[in-house]
Image (cartoon, rainbow, N blue to C red):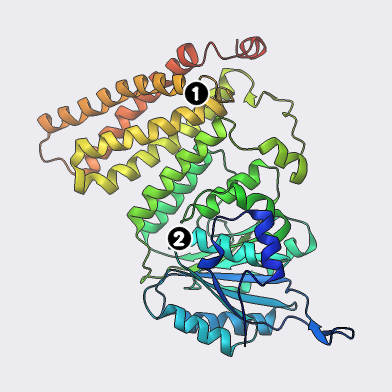
Amino acid sequence: MRTVTPERGGHTARAQEHHNAPTARAEIVLCMSVVTAPTQADPSSGTDRRPGPLLDVVVPVYNEERDLETSVRRLHAHLTDHFPYPFRITIADNASTDGTPQIAAALAGELQAVTSLRMAQKGRGRALRAAWSASDAKVLAYCDVDLSTDLAALLPLVAPLITGHSDLAIGTRLSPGSRVVRGAKREFISRSYNLILRGTLHARFSDAQCGFKAIRADVARRLLPLVKDTGWFFDTELLVLAERAGLRIHEVPVDWVDDPDSSVDIVATAIADLKGVARLGRALATGALPLHELRAQLGRDDIRPAENEVAGVPKGMPGQIVRFAAIGVASTLAYLLIYALLRGSMGAFGANLVGLVITAVANTAANRRLTFGVRGREGAAAHQFQGLMVFGLGLALTSGALAALGVWWPHASQLVEMVVLVAANALSTVLRFVAFRAWIFRARRSPSQQEISA
């Protein structure tokens, strides 16, 4: 077994130079035992030079001593038997406190083409960034350690990246061809989250959360420095940036079986994801990301607006209503999710307030950019302030509805509460559209847009 540190690995140094990744070199210990291709001897130096693998599959782990060995052996056996190209498996441990690091090191010492990478800080996204940045493979992938996704989808996942047909690839559990076994709660959360992404960030990919994704290394070198999240929102942010840059995302229907013993904190993850959506939406709305530069360098599609759009806004009020309605549906689902998660700890009124504040900020940012075509930082703060004033109206409507329900039906169930809140939100949504169109964004629309909307 060879032990290689990032300071001495040539590929790692180059990757860090390109990425300027935030992970400190001293935080990473990399143990390697890799066989990728027949050795090419260098007669002048007497040393062996081995090309990097075509595929590097990263398995991010945190306190997975129970499942790690079984899963890695299964993944290694599958790749050995069914993947016709040189490969590597990288176990990316992000600050585990149990026996995971020792098991990972032992596997790296025993199995060919297995490496172990140890991070000093926790964070699934941080571990993926470090592993991908340090890799010399042409195609970078990752899968969750529980291997919930059928490994038969791995070759179809990476094949379009190997040929250059696509830039990123994701496994999707929401395709008609997918076969999924999971509980109703996780199904609802997953579909709600993807609807939120479609409404607020205008995402077109179907499944952001499936732990089964791949990316070409040259594309990763450009996108990774722009991804800020170090946790579970990491790959969603990566996909949104890739899509906005005009890159091609290939989707593979997968067979997926939920792990009932998953250690993921659903509530904390959902809240962190919603914060990530708000942050990324704000960055997109204010023009803080170099999307035009990325499109020019990496994008495949024409960056000019389509014939039925002016400055990214659909023609006329009907198009604006459709876009506003989609964002409204996503906002309502996000609000209901937040309300359901916080209802037990904060009570009905507290959960209502927090849910409305979070979704109001995201809703204003999304409508500013997607419905009314306002770009750049100028006026963004004023628009958010005006949006919060409109939010006050929504708060009054929903709080009043809750108060009235408490008087008329003191022992109403949580389901009845949600039905009443949906009705109140529907009314406030209509009033919000009128306020957005006639007041908040009226002065920002260009003469050409006003002519089209008339």
Q: Image height check: is 41 above or below 378?
A: below
Mark 1 nearby-residue class (10 Å; few <14, some 14–19, many ≥20) = some
- Residue at horizontal 34%, vertical 32%? 357
Secondary structure beneath label 2: loop
Residue 169 location in percent, x, y? 65, 58
Residue extending furthest bottom? 110
Amino acid type indicated by mark 2: Gly
In this view of the protein, which residue sits in the foreground, 193 or 237? 237
Q: From mark 1 to mark 2, how far is it between C-alphas?
A: 31 Å
Question: Where is residue 62 shown, x and y percent of the image?
Answer: 42, 70
Q: Quadrant of residue 214?
A: bottom right
| 31 to 182, vertically: above or below | below
Label of residue 380 in the image: 1
Residue at (37% x, 48% y) in the render: 271
* Position of residue 397 measured from the top left corner of the image (x, y, whole percent): 26, 24
Q: Which residue is mark 2?
A: 123
In which quadrant will I find the N terminus?
Answer: bottom right
Taking depth in this image into account, of 47 and 338 the one nearest to the observer is 47
